[in-house]
Image (spheres, grey):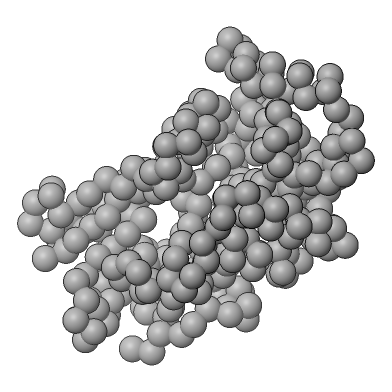
Amino acid sequence: MEFSEITLNSKYLFDHYIKRHKPRISELTFTNFFAWRYYYRFRYAVISDLLCVIAAPAKGRPFAMMPLGDVNGRNFEEAYKAIRSYFAERGWELCFSRITKDELAYFRDKVTNEDSIVFDRDNSDYVYLTKDLVELKGKKYDGKRNHINRFRKEHTFEYVPLECGLLDECVRIMEEWCRERDCSCMEGDYCERNANLELLRHFRTLGCKGALIKVDGEFEAFTVGEMLNEDTAVIHIEKAKSSINGLYAIINQQFAQNEWSGTTYINREQDLGLEGMRKAKLSYHPVMLAEKFNVYPV
C-alpha cells in the first residue's frame, strides 16, 4: 500500500472525505493536517473509499487516525487490515489516536480489555456555545466582562478582518509571541510557531477566516479559524501581546461576534495538558469536551 505525503494539491481529496465524515474534533480539517505535516510526518492513502492517515513524528510513537469518509463495518475492516499491515512491516506497535467516543464501537472487537482504550484528556477539545462567547452573560463571565471593560477604558481598538495584505502583521505578532517564550523549534520538537506560519503562508488557499485587533493604532493581536462542520467553527490560532490586559478576551469575543455568530458551537481545540492553557480554556465554561481516545489493538 502506497502512502503519500500531504501537499496543497491534497486539499480537494481531504476536503471530500472529511466532509463525508462529519467531523467533530479539531484535527479533522485539511488546514490542520497541512500545517502540522512536518511535525507529525503525516502520510495518507485511500483504502476502500476511506481516507487513511498515519503519523510518524520524529520524537513520538507512530499512530493512525480514524479512517475518514462514509465508514461502515465492511470498509472499516479493510482499511484497518491495511493499516495494521503497514505498522507491522515497519515494526511499529499499532495505535489509533484521536478516536472519538462514537468511533470506539469500531474497535471493540480489536481489543481484549478496557485497558487497551485510554482516554486522552490532554488532546480533548473544548467546545463552547457561540452565544456564550459573544454575549458573556451571567455571573460566571463577570471576570471576562471586567477584563473587556478595563481594556475599553484604557485603549482605543479596531477590529480588522484578515486580508492577505495584513499577513505580515500576523507573522510579526507570532514572532514576538515566540520570542517572549523562547520557542524551541528544533527538528522533532513540538513547534506551534512553524505550524502557524505554514497556515499564514497559505492562508488564501486554505480558505480560513481571520481577524486582527489594532490597539491604539498598532496591530497587537490576530486569530484564525474556519468551519469544522455545519454548526461548528474551530479556532486554529489566537495570539496577542500578553502585556495588554484584556486583549485576549477582546479578540476572542470580537471574532466570535463578527465571524461566527451564525454557528451554534465554537471548538477552541485542546490544552495539551498545559496547566495555564487548561485554566484559560475552562474559564470560558465549555458546554462540552469533544473527548478523544487512544486505542491499542491486540
Quadrant (top left, top right, bottom left, bottom right) of the C terminus: bottom left
Q: Relative to the observer, which residue lies in front, 68 or 26?
A: 26
| Residue 225 appears in the picture as rendered | no
Asked if 116 appears above or below 204 in the picture, the reply is above
> What residue is shown at x 31% (from left), y 71% (from top)?
62
| Residue 134 appears in the picture as rendered | yes
Residue at the limit of the structure toward the bottom, as seen here: 2
Picture quadrant of residue 175: bottom right
Residue at the limit of the structure toward the right, as seen here: 217
> What residue is shown at x 40% (from left), y 85% (from top)?
3
The answer to whether 156 appears left or right of 199 in the picture is right
Q: Position of residue 214 (x, y in %)?
A: 85, 41
Q: Position of residue 59 (x, y in %)?
A: 35, 69
Residue at the limit of the structure toward the top, as seen here: 139
Quadrant (top left, top right, bottom left, bottom right) of the N terminus: bottom left
The answer to whether 160 appears left or right of 48 in the picture is right
